[in-house]
Structures are given as C-alpha cells and as structure tokens.
Image (cartoon, rainbow, N blue to C red):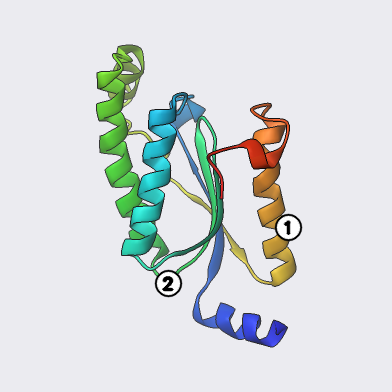
Amino acid sequence: MKTEIFDLKLLIPTYYISLTVYKRLDIFTKAEYLDLIAENLKFYSCKHGVKIYGYVLLTNQLFCICSTTKLLQFSYDFKGYTTKAILDLLELDERYYLLNFLEQNKIRIWERTTCIEVITNINQLKEKLNHLSVKPVNAGFVKEPCHWKYSY
C-alpha cells in the first residue's frame, strides 16, 4: 500500500499551503465571508482538478492540504476571485475602515506570497491533517475540532 501512495505522490504532488490575509487582518469574522471562501475553495478545486485532503478557515487564514499539478493556476484563480468577492462583501457590510486601509496600501485581500510545503510521505500527511484539525481549538473558537464548521 505504501508503494502505491508513493507512486501516486510522484505523479501528483501533495502540498500543505497557507494563504494569509494581508497583515493578518481579521476579515473573515462573519459566516458570509467564511462560506464564500469555503464555496470557492470547492469550486476552484473542481475547476483545476485539485484533490483536497483537508482544510481549515480562520478569521485571517486558509490552511489546505491538497494534491495537484496546477497549484499556481489554482492559487491565482482562487485568490483573484475571492479578492473581488470579499471586497464586495466588505462594501455591503459597510466596513469602510478595512476598505480604506487596503486601498491606501494598494493591497488586495491576500498576501502576495503563498506558503507552500511539499508533503513527501503518508506520516507527514497524517501529521499535517492533525495539525489542521486543532487550529480552531488552539485559536479558542471551539473546544473540540469537530465543532468547527469551516474545516474538512
């Protein structure tokens, strides 16, 4: 079985990625923002053939474990669309202080860089999945990982 996983890994690289909001601003503080990110993560993963093993959304970050040969296209499209959609939500919510700050700094929503770590074996994959599951607990949002709606 491990040989099969290893062979698959050679064909489809697996990554632990972290997308961070500019200056770690707590933008995703309402369900509408988190839902938008989760829905678009699913949409763009299907569009680009990305296999999602797990993810967790926090108020200013998205952590995801995925396999793909199109990581750059996926990240570019996902960040581009969600930036526009989140800016629209900020305007609807009249969060002008955030919009003004982002505009003054000529920044969109996401940091320009995406932290990427290659996962090389099944033990590392399990460790990263466990790491994802405890992030909402460590942040104090829930007492048990299964209670956090914005993870998979």
Q: Quadrant of residue 101?
A: top left
Q: Residue furthest front?
A: 147
Label 1 to label 2: alpha-carbon separation = 22 Å
Whether residue 112 is visible, yes or no, is: no
**Looking at the rendered structure, which numbered label has been put on residue 69?**
2
Along the line of sight, the residue nearer the viewer: 2 or 98: 2
Whether residue 130 is visible, yes or no, is: yes
Asked which secondary structure carries label 1, the reply is: helix
Residue 69 image point, x, y percent: 42, 72
Circle 1 Cα neighbour tier, 10 Å, few/some/many (<14 / 14–19 / ≥20): few
Q: Residue at x 32, y 32 (%)?
A: 86
Using residue 118 as the reference point, say whether residue 43 is left or right of it: left
Residue 45 image point, x, y percent: 39, 59
Query: The residue under label 2 is which amino acid type?
Result: Thr
Query: The residue under label 1 is which amino acid type?
Result: Glu
Which one is in front in this view, the residue at disc 1 or the one at disc 2? 1
Q: Is residue 98 above or below residue 8?
A: above
Circle 2 Cα neighbour tier, 10 Å, few/some/many (<14 / 14–19 / ≥20): some
Per the image, the residue denoted by label 1 is 127
Residue 62 image point, x, y percent: 51, 43
Q: Residue at x 53, y 40 (%)?
A: 150
**Looking at the rendered structure, which numbered label has been put on residue 31?**
none
Residue 96 image point, x, y percent: 30, 13
Along the line of sight, the residue nearer the viewer: 9 or 30: 30
